[in-house]
Amino acid sequence: MSEFKSLFEENDPRRVAQGKVPVLPDRSDKLPNNYTMKQLNDYLQSAEKDPSVRWKTPKDCVCSGLKWLSGHYSTEHPDFGKYFPCMCAINERKGTMREFLWGQSGLSSGNIPNLSDFDTSYYTDGPYAKESVIKWMNDEGEPWLIMMGPPGLGKTHLAKASTANLIGMGKPVHYTTVREIMNNSRSWISQHTSEKWIEYLEKIEKIQYLVLDDLGQEYATDWSRQVLFDIIDTRYETKLPTFITTNINSSEWATYLGGACADRLQDHTLSKNVVLQGTSVRRKAGRDG
């Protein structure tokens, strides 16, 4: 597709940074199977009184709805084996959960489209697309929803509206575009602030619901393919709910995203694919898509 343009002067933005720059955080933390909800609740109550625990909590929810996190510590570290409350648990106790969810959602406060405003009359598969989004938000059916179609058919409308609805349901969710992910990687890595990049990726990988808009609106470099594969592969293994919109047909996924990434997206035991067809309704309805 000739309209795709590279985000970088070089394929890999790590080339402009000095030294070895990690791409993804360590995923070594696991919760013991016998760690019960009562133990977790008792720990949360004690941890909130302990300043040495509170400062270790991330600013965003990355617990996938479980409300706990474990540290990346060696066996010699005094905090080895301890679990810390996620920020969503702390804000829930403080009664500020709604504000917290909006703050980490990736959406600005103004001009958020409503799901009820999505006009299904412009194309025959509109009702099916809307119904699929509602079922996905309610955890009915497959945990992944992949919506394909040309620009202007309301994919972004549904993506942003579903994010707002999930916030209203009290569920941790983050909306982002693939271009935003790549821009952040370019900015933070080139500025030698790879810690921000690692924290950002951990949030995208572990948050309970992820809405990934405009997959394919970036140049298919080795760097972008690797970043997208790491995100998709992590959420594939954990089966966390993920809503993806793309202008790329499934037959072209391997070309632009790589074979391994395309293979995961085409796993129909995990994902439901919805194809929107028709001409752009953006000029008719004045909405983004």
Image: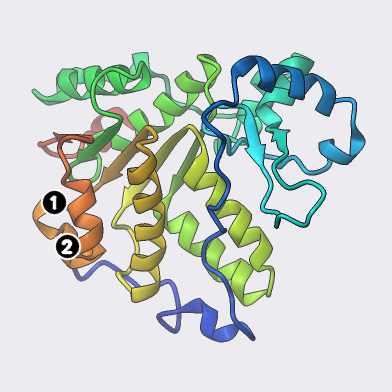
Give the position of the N terminus as an image quadrant.
bottom left
* Mark 1 lies on residue: 249
Q: Position of residue 174 (x, y in %)?
A: 51, 37
Residue 89 is left or right of residue 258, and the answer is right
* Mark 2 lies on residue: 254
Residue 38 is left or right of residue 255, and the answer is right
Q: Nearer the viewer, residue 139 or 269?
A: 269
Q: Position of residue 253 (x, y in %)?
A: 18, 58
Give the position of the C terminus as an image quadrant.
top left
Asked if residue 89 can be seen in this view, the reply is: yes
Q: Residue at x 34, y 36 (%)?
A: 243
Q: Amino acid at mark 1?
A: Asn
Q: Residue at x 55, y 50 (%)?
A: 202
Kind of element beneath mark 1: loop
Q: Residue at x 24, y 31 (%)?
A: 284
Mark closer to the observer (1, 2):
2
Among the 4 quarters of the image, the one containing residue 32: top right
Colouring scheme applied when the structure was drawn: rainbow
Q: Nearer the viewer, residue 280 or 113?
A: 113
Residue 218 is left or right of residue 174, and the answer is left
Q: Position of residue 7 (x, y in %)?
A: 43, 71
Q: Nearer the viewer, residue 121 or 168?
A: 168
Q: Nearer the viewer, residue 18 or 269?
A: 269
**Which numbered disc flags the more N-terminal residue, 1 or 2?**
1
* Marks 1 and 2, how far apart at CA: 10 Å
